[in-house]
Image (cartoon, rainbow, N blue to C red):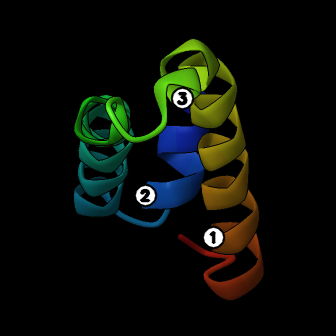
Amino acid sequence: LYLAMIIVGGLGSVAGSVYGATFMTVLPALIQQFARNVRDTLPMISREIPAIQLIVFGLVIVLFLIFEPRG
């Protein structure tokens, strides 16, 4: 998680690191809220939340490395 915060925020500035840390801290809460909202429609989603979080973290890291390599 700490590595993801640094990658998303970048090493070039303190503000970027703070933004990265905030984003990667809020992201699990957003995923949990999404899961609560769709639980009635897709009951199987609540079992898959840990896997979904890992997938989303991985996608965020890869996308930031591709599109914003300096953070």
Q: Quadrant of residue 35?
A: top left
Residue at the spot of label 1: 64
Q: Nearer the viewer, residue 63 or 52?
A: 52
Dot 2 amino acid type: Gly
Residue at the spot of label 2: 9
Element at badge 3? helix
Q: Quadrant of residue 14?
A: bottom left
Distance from disc 3 to disc 1, alpha carbons, whole Å, reads 26 Å
What x and y, as percent, mark residue 47? 58, 13
Dot 1 amino acid type: Phe
Q: Is residue 5 left or right of residue 47?
A: left
- Single out the mark in the foreground, 3 or 1: 3
Q: Is residue 6 above or below residue 71?
A: above
Residue at the spot of label 3: 45
Q: Is residue 55 above or below residue 44?
A: below
Distance from disc 3 to disc 2, alpha carbons, whole Å, reads 29 Å
Q: Earlier in the sequence, mark 3 or mark 1?
A: 3
| Residue plotted at (57% across, 32% down) | 53
Q: Is residue 68 left or right of residue 37?
A: right
The numbered mark at residue 14 is none
- Single out the mark in the foreground, 1 or 2: 1
Distance from disc 1 to disc 2, alpha carbons, whole Å, reads 9 Å
